Image: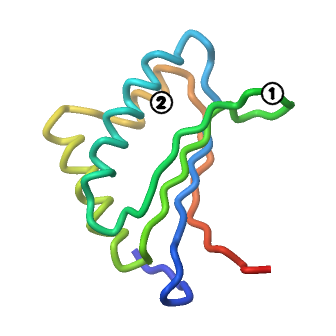
Amino acid sequence: MDISHASGKPLYRINKFSVPAESRDAFLELMAKTHAVLRRQEGVVTDQILEQHSGPGVFNFVAIIAFTGPAVIDSVVSAVAAYDRETGIDRQQIMTALNIKTDMGLYHNLDI
């Protein structure tokens, strides 16, 4: 994965999810498993799973993962993919079956 990024600064993966109420428990189970894998990876500084408490918006869950930088992204992605293969998880199929909409991307701090 080619990522242009100022060196020495954390890189953030922000995943936003629109989760129907009836899919909440299954979604949170998958998130717990995924973040357990993430927390064991070198280069993952911190992670959070946030649930919207109030206010308008399409996305009711947000996951924020901070990495030490772009050099660790490939190994972290590979670790999650290996976990998925070992456990038979098909994330695309799960998101479709649970009617979950996503918006995901990598972000860096602008320091403004």
Q: Residue furthest top?
A: 22
Q: What amino acid type should be assigned to the residue bearing mark 2?
A: Met
Q: Quadrant of residue 94?
A: top left
Q: Is residue 41 left or right of residue 58?
A: left
Q: What amino acid type should be assigned to the residue bearing mark 1?
A: Ser
Image location of residue 16, percent across then percent down: 62, 43
Residue in the picture at 54% in, 52% down: 64
| Marking on residue 54 | 1
Whole-Å distance between the Cαs marked 1 and 2?
A: 24 Å
| Colour pattern of the rendering | rainbow
Q: Is residue 78 left or right of residue 30?
A: left
Q: Is residue 47 left or right of residue 102?
A: left
**Relative vertical location of residue 23 with respect to residue 106 in this rendering, above or below:** above
* Earlier residue among tags 1 and 2: 1
Badge 2 element: helix
Which residue occupies the foreground of this view, 91 or 67? Answer: 67
**Relative vertical location of residue 108 with respect to residue 20 in this rendering, above or below:** below
The residue labelled by disc 2 is 95
Image location of residue 44, percent across then percent down: 37, 62
Q: Quadrant of residue 57?
A: top right
Which residue occupies the foreground of this view, 1 or 68? Answer: 68
Image location of residue 67, percent across then percent down: 44, 67
Residue in the picture at 53% in, 39% down: 49
Image location of residue 88, percent across then percent down: 20, 32
Front of the two marks 1 and 2: 1
Residue in the picture at 46% in, 51% down: 47
Badge 2 crowding class, 10 Å Cα cut-off, few under 14, some 14 to 19, many 20 or more, is some
Q: Is residue 31 left or right of residue 40?
A: right
The C terminus, quarter of image: bottom right
Residue in the picture at 25% in, 53% down: 40
Badge 1 element: loop
Which residue occupies the foreground of this view, 56 or 97? Answer: 56
